[in-house]
Amino acid sequence: MVKKWFSIIGREIRGLHEAAYLLAGFAVLSMLLALVRDKLLAYSFGAGHTLDIYYAAFEVPDILFATIGSLVSASILLPYFIEKFRHNDEEGKQFSDAIFTVFFGAIVLGSAIVFFIAPFILPRVLPGFAGSADLPKLILTTRVMLLSPFFLGLSNLFSSLTQMRHRFLVYAASPVVYNLGIIAGVLFFYPIFGVAGLAVGVGLGAFMHMGIQLPFLSHEGMVPHFVFRGIDWSKIKRIAITSLPRTATLSANQLASFILVSMASLMATGSISVFNFAFNLQSVPLSIIGASYSSAVFPTLSHLYYEKNLKEFLEKMIAAARHIIFWSVPVTVLFVVLRAQIVRTVLGAGRFDWADTRLTAAMLALFTLSTVGQSLIVLFVRAFYAEGKTARPFLVNAISASSIVLSGFFFLWLFKVSPLFHFFLEDILRVDGQTGTSVLALSLAYSFGVGLNTILHWWLFERAYPGFTKPVLGTIFHSLSASIIMGYAAYLALRVFAAVFPLTKVWGVFMQGLVAGIIGIVVLIITLIILNNPELKEVWRTLHRKIWKVSMPPAEVERI
């Protein structure tokens, strides 16, 4: 049975839309488990001290993963592996062994350094915990969490090899087992080890994320081994130089997020938890739509650029951008309209009370404003990486990260000194009278920075490939206008069914949101049909094909 399972997920599979839908299917499964994970965390602990410690413990390992783990990302290594193995399998194997050896040493050294300096740096970078009784727990949990960047870094390295051989299902299944490990941490390890047990679950999930790829690599004789002689340091240096802008890009993003969490640590108890719950929920459409399309198109873009077929390169980018916008805009509108129903259904009950729900829903609405932009950014970045132009995304993301941090301080200052801004933000998001609302300034800053990032990336790509924007404008008009009508229909349906279902019960809130969402989606489809929308026709044709018989790679891990 186990052998049969590995033979299925290790199968070779080769159209853009079909591949994206296949990967989206795995992303949906992974997201469902992620929602179960967050539901368990919210039910068990609520937005309080325990989850503040748990989420804060991710921050330093995340930075470590962004700096060292990104050196072996598929976005960087895949074009090199394609080139090396196309020439000679033995040359490719020597190359992968060298990369594995160098990375293993670097991540172990980095983890060891963080392990020993954690007591000194954590009170400074997360000042809300300085002098707190929770600081020892945070230090221990952070140290255990260092297992994650180690295993996920190896997993990203292995995924370059599995993707090169078109065995994409095996890596697509990796996030599923990752979330299973975290769930095990909540159910089994927390009762034994306390909050550090949650980190044990994260480490277990990361190990399984890596381990699920080993049977295929072992069968193909491609498991990297340690080598201590014959490492071509000139090639390693070339990759390091190539990946340095990408590493700096990820580091800039992580640093911006880190600073926002650092600011949240000084706010009311539960602010870090609310920030992360809302961020995780808004990541669902990004993982299902943006990551799936950008990952599906990346190897094709790499091959097309390698063959200098720039006309088809541009056509693939236009197709991917159109469908990302087609899906992302309606999802954004639905998430904003149904935010309270989503949060209450996914996270509500147990220790996660109505006050937590209201604040998380408001945060979700602000984060969701950046969904379309985040999805397009991933696509643009992959396109530049396919060309080997890693400096451009770095410069843009550095500007964006700086704007997130500066606007975070600005909006927080404005929230404190301007009663008008304070009242407007609370009133429009319906959290007036709620405590701890200053955390809303952080999600607003994040979406502002993402918006700037999107504009800059789009401008750079249009300069490099004139003619990209015009075919996408029609999709923007259709999707946005239909989504506004859909959102209004869903909002009216919420008001009607508020009198039908008992909103004091989670199932009543769920049914209210579900029926309103279905009505909104039906209105959306009817509107798109009236507009004779071409993307809707393409989706219909695609769904009549056997999408499980195609292949493109899933998204690699960029954040633990």
Image (cartoon, helix red, strand yellow):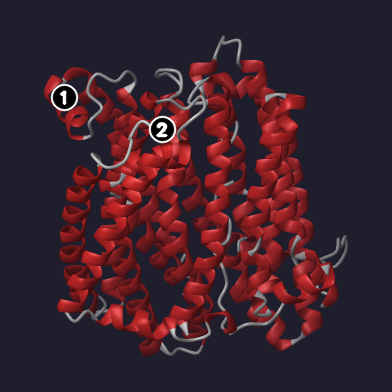
> Dots 2 and 1: beta carbons under 8 Å?
no
Q: Nearer the viewer, residue 396 or 516?
A: 516
2 or 1: mark nearer the eye: 1
Outermost residue to the left: 420
Q: Position of residue 113 (x, y in %)?
A: 71, 34
Q: Position of residue 122 (x, y in %)?
A: 59, 23
Q: Nearer the viewer, residue 173 or 187?
A: 187
Q: Mark 2 packing: few (<14 Cα in 10 Å), some, or many (20+)?
A: many
Whether residue 88 is visible to the viewer of this picture, yes or no, is yes
Callout 1: helix, strand or loop? helix
* Figure check: 16 above or below 451: below
Q: Quadrant of residue 224?
A: bottom right
Query: Count of labels shown?
Result: 2
Q: Amino acid at mark 2?
A: Leu
Q: Considering only order in the chain, which callout, 1 or 2, is on the residue closer to the N terminus?
A: 2
Q: Mark 1 packing: few (<14 Cα in 10 Å), some, or many (20+)?
A: some
Q: Is residue 380 left or right of residue 163?
A: left
Residue at image x 52%, y 27%?
350
- Can you say which quadrant of the picture contains the N terminus? bottom right
Q: Which mark is residue 47?
A: none
Callout 2: helix, strand or loop? helix
Q: Amino acid at mark 1?
A: Phe
The CA distance from mark 2 to mark 1 is 22 Å
Q: Nearer the viewer, residue 446 or 55?
A: 55
Q: Is residue 178 left or right of residue 339?
A: right
Q: Position of residue 487 (x, y in %)?
A: 20, 54
* Residue to which mark 2 is pinned: 260
Residue at image x 77%, y 76%?
7
